[in-house]
Amino acid sequence: MELSITQEDAGHTAEGLPLFIFALCNRHGMEVRISTLGGAIARIQVPDRNGRLANVVHGAAPDCGIHLQPAPGRALHRLPWHAVPLVEDASVGLRLVSPGPQAVVATYVLDEASGLSLHCQAPAAAPATLCLRTVFNMAGEGDVFGQLLTVGAARIVPAGEHEQDVAGTRWDFLAPRPLAELPGQGRYLQGKDQRAGLSLQLLDPASGRLLAVATDAASLRLGLGDPATGLCCEPVLAAAGGSISLRFSAQG
């Protein structure tokens, strides 16, 4: 299988505007499907340790896509974006531009090492932050309680609580722990001396599928879905934008 990018119709918005799905594929069988509706990742198909493929993203989960927050009247995840395919020798990608003035530009790139990167850029005057909302299940189906989570972050803001150190708390996932032990919804932050950015790993021991996330995001919101069939992952980028790297592999 060669590097490729294809386009297919995906219906229309309520206003009659056309929607499309772009499929990015590499030579390892990895396929990433991106919707022009909100720039959402609709599907990521990756192999397990035995080469069996599964979709590890719940693309139909509510409000998935790129958000501009707070941005009254600009629900970017519900609007169709303009898309431009990108083809290089060792990668394929998609550049998405949000509608209206002060456009946000989001560029997805899939490489041959099964890495998917997203770079977002917003106008300097944008009074908001950018985030990508995605729901992952590395088994492809069923609940995620037994999947192992590791989070490289020093601080946490649990929902409804104050910011605190992670170490020694229920939110301490500096070493791998089952998702069943995630206390709830929380926003992970870098510590003052943390210069490498935020990171996350999610491993399904049964299949060996591993997701490694690295980002220069200001924070990383995490929580289980309801029902718990996926980990809601939401890197929150600074107002001017930033980058998110998703790398997939299979552990033996």
Image (cartoon, grey):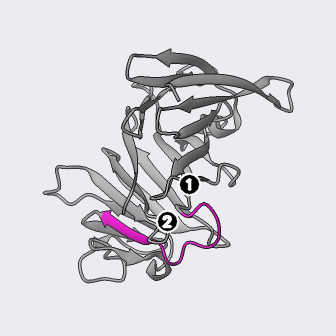
Whether label 1 touches label 2, CB < 8 Å: yes
From the image, tell me which residue sits under label 2. 207
Looking at the rendered structure, the kind of residue marked 1 is Arg
State left or right for residue 105 relative to residue 191.
right
Q: Residue at x 64, y 25 (%)?
A: 81
Q: Earlier in the sequence, mark 1 or mark 2?
A: 1
Identify the element where label 1 is drawn: loop
Q: Label 2 neighbourhood size at 10 Å, few (<14), some (14-19), many (20+)?
A: many
The count of marks equals 2
Q: Is residue 159 above or below residue 131?
A: below
Q: Label 1 neighbourhood size at 10 Å, few (<14), some (14-19), many (20+)?
A: few
Q: Residue 190: horizontal and vertical position, in percent?
A: 26, 57
Q: Residue at x 64, y 35 (%)?
A: 38
* Residue 144 counted in the magenta span: yes
The disc label shown at residue 52, or none: 1
Looking at the rendered structure, the kind of residue marked 2 is Ser
Taking depth in this image into account, of 159 and 144 the one nearest to the observer is 144
Q: CA distance from mark 1 to mark 2?
A: 9 Å
State left or right for residue 61 relative to residue 174.
right
Taking depth in this image into account, of 73 and 248 the one nearest to the observer is 248
Q: Is residue 91 visible?
A: yes
Q: Residue 151: horizontal and vertical position, in percent?
A: 33, 65
Taking depth in this image into account, of 50 and 158 the one nearest to the observer is 50
Identify the element where label 2 is drawn: loop
Which quadrant would residue 125 be assigned to in this image?
top left
Residue farthest along the front direction in this orientation: 50
* Residue 203 counted in the magenta span: no
Q: Is residue 97 visible?
A: no
Q: Residue 124: horizontal and vertical position, in percent?
A: 39, 25
Question: What residue range appears in magenta?
Answer: 139-151
